[in-house]
Image: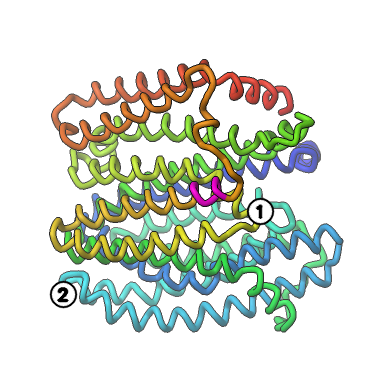
Amino acid sequence: MLQKINAYYKNHRLVCNALFSVAQIVFVGLTYFIIYTLLLHKLGSEKLGIWSLILSTTSVANVATTGLALSLVKYIAMYNADIDHIKINKYIKTGLFIISLLTGVIIIIVYILGKFFLPKVMPLNNVQEAISLLPLSLMSLFLNAIGGVFLSTLEGLHHSAFRSISYIVSSILFTIVAFLLIDQYGLMGIAIAQVIQAIMLILLGVFFLKLLFRKVSLFPIVFDKIIFKEIFGYSASFQFIGVCTILIEPVVKFMISRFGGLSFVGFYEMGSRLVSQIRALIISANQVMVPYISKISASQNSKNDFTYPIILKLVYYLTVCLMVFIILLSPVISVLWIGTYNEVFVKTLIILSAATTINLISTPAYFSSMGLGKLNGILYSHAIFLVLNIILGYFLGINFGGWGVIVSYSLSYLVCSFVTIFYYHKIYNIKILRLFNSNGERRWIILNFLIYIGLSISLITFSNLMPQAFYILMSFVVSFLFIYIAYNKDTSLQKTFIKIRDKV
C-alpha cells in the first residue's frame, strides 16, 4: 500500500502538492473557526478583541522573514535542479542564522513598541492582560520563523505537500491544546497552545526534511556572506511588499480598537478572517489550474498568450459565485457562528467580501507580475494601500468610529487592486474590454456587477429583517444560477475545462 502511495506521489507530485495546499487552507480555516468560537463563547468578545490585537502586534515581527522565505525557495529549487547538495545545505544553515538573528532583534523592538502602543488603543483595565500575552506570542512567532526555514526548504525541493501536512497536523494540535487549556488559563492557554504548535512545526519540518533529503546537514550553523547577499539581493522588493502588507493589519485593528472598542475588533476579526480564508481558497484553486492552462496555451501554436485571459475569467466567475454566496448567507453565518445576528460581523463580512472581490480579480495580474519580475506595479499598489489606509482610517475613524476605519480599509484595498490591474495592463497593452467580448459577455458582466452591488447594499440595509431560510435559498439560487449562465456564455472557458478534464 505504501509503495503504491509513494509511486503515485512521484508520478503526480504537482497534483498532490496542489491538493494538499487546498487541504491546508481548509484545515487552517477550520482551526480559526473553532478557536474564535471558543474565545467568543467562553471568554467573550472583548477577550477576542484583545487576542486579535496581540496577533496583529506580534505579526509585525514577520518583517524579519518577509521575502527571505521566497529567496530560500528560489535558490534551493535552483540548486536542487543541479543536484548540488552542498549548496542547499549552505542555504539552509545561512537562512537559519539570518532569520534567527533578525527575528530575535525585531521581537525585542516589537515588545517595547507593544508596551508603548497597546495602552493607547484599548481600555486601561485590559492593558496588563494584553502585555502579559506578548512574550509567549512573540516566542511562538520566533519558533515559527525557524520552522519556516525548514518548510521553505521542502517547498524549494518541490515537496510542498509535506509543508502543507506540517501545517495541518500542527493546526489540529493547536486546536486540541487550546480546547484543553482555555477554561483554566483563558487567553494565556491560547498563547501556550500557539507555542506548542510552533514547536510541532519545527519538529515536523526537520522530520520531513530528513526523510526526503537524506543529505541534509543542519549543524554546525554557518554564515555565508555570498549567500547572504544573494538572499537579500533577490528579496529586497519582496521585503518592501511584505513590510507594507504586514503593517496594514495592525494599523487597521489598532484604529478600530481606538475608535470602535475591543468588541468591535473581535467581531471584525471574525468577519475578516472568514473572508481571508475564502480568498486563500480561491487563490489556491487558481494556482492549481495555472500549470494546466499554461500547457493548453502552449499547445495553441500561437504567439498570443491565452493564459492570462482564461485565468482572469476563471478567477472572476469563481470569486463572484463564492462571494455572492457569502454575502447572502452572512446573517445565517452570524447566527450559526456567534449564536445571534451581530451587526458588526454581518456588515463587516459584506463590506470586506465586496472589496475582496475586486482584489481577487487583480490576482492574475499580481501573480503574473511576480512571476515575470515586473514588481513596480505591486510596489506602488502596496505603498498606496498602506499610506491611504492610515490617512483615511484616521480621519474617517474620528468621524464615523469603527465603521469609518473598515470603509477606509476597503476603499484602500480597492485602489490598491486597481493600481495592480492597470499597471499590468499598461505594460502589456491589454484592453480589459477585449477580454470579455463574445456572446454578450460584456453586457452580462456589467449586469452581474450591478446585481452584485445591489445585493450588497440591500443586505447592509435590511440584513436582519428576513428569515434565515430566505437567505439560504437566495444564496444557493443566485450563486449557482450565476455559474450556470456564465459557463454557458463563455465558450472559451468551456473548452478549457474540457481539455483540463481530459489531461487530469
Could you tell whether 311 is left or right of 340 in the image?
Answer: right
Q: What is the span of residues highlighted in magenta in the rendered image?
A: 421-426
Please state which amino acid type lies under the numbered disc 2: Leu
Position in image of residue 409 (x %, y %):
31, 55
Please state which of residues 501 and 170 is positioned toward the viewer in this rendering.
Answer: 501
Nearer to us: label 2 or label 1: 1
Position in image of residue 377 (x %, y %):
52, 57
Q: Residues within 10 Å of mark 2 (few under 14, many from 20)?
A: few
Work out whether 284 lies above or below 255. above
Position in image of residue 292 (x %, y %):
69, 34
**Residue 258 visible:** yes
Please state which amino acid type lies under the numbered disc 1: Leu
* Residue corresponding to mark 1: 372
Which structural element holds mark 1?
helix
- The structure residue drawn at horizontal position 43% and vertical position 46%, both measured from the top left corner, is 359
- The structure residue drawn at horizontal position 19% and vertical position 43%, both measured from the top left corner, is 342
- The structure residue drawn at horizontal position 70% and vertical position 81%, both measured from the top left corner, is 221
Work out whether 138 lies above or below 341. below
- The structure residue drawn at horizontal position 71% and vertical position 58%, both measured from the top left corner, is 156
Q: Given contact means CB atoms under 8 Å apart, are the residues at marks 2 and 1 in contact?
A: no
Please state which of residues 283 and 132 is positioned toward the viewer in this rendering.
Answer: 283
Please state which of residues 92 and 190 is positioned toward the viewer in this rendering.
Answer: 92
* Residue corresponding to mark 2: 124
Could you tell whether 328 is left or right of 310 in the image?
Answer: left
Q: Quadrant of residue 434?
A: top right
Please state which of residues 315 and 33 is positioned toward the viewer in this rendering.
Answer: 315
Number of numbered discs: 2
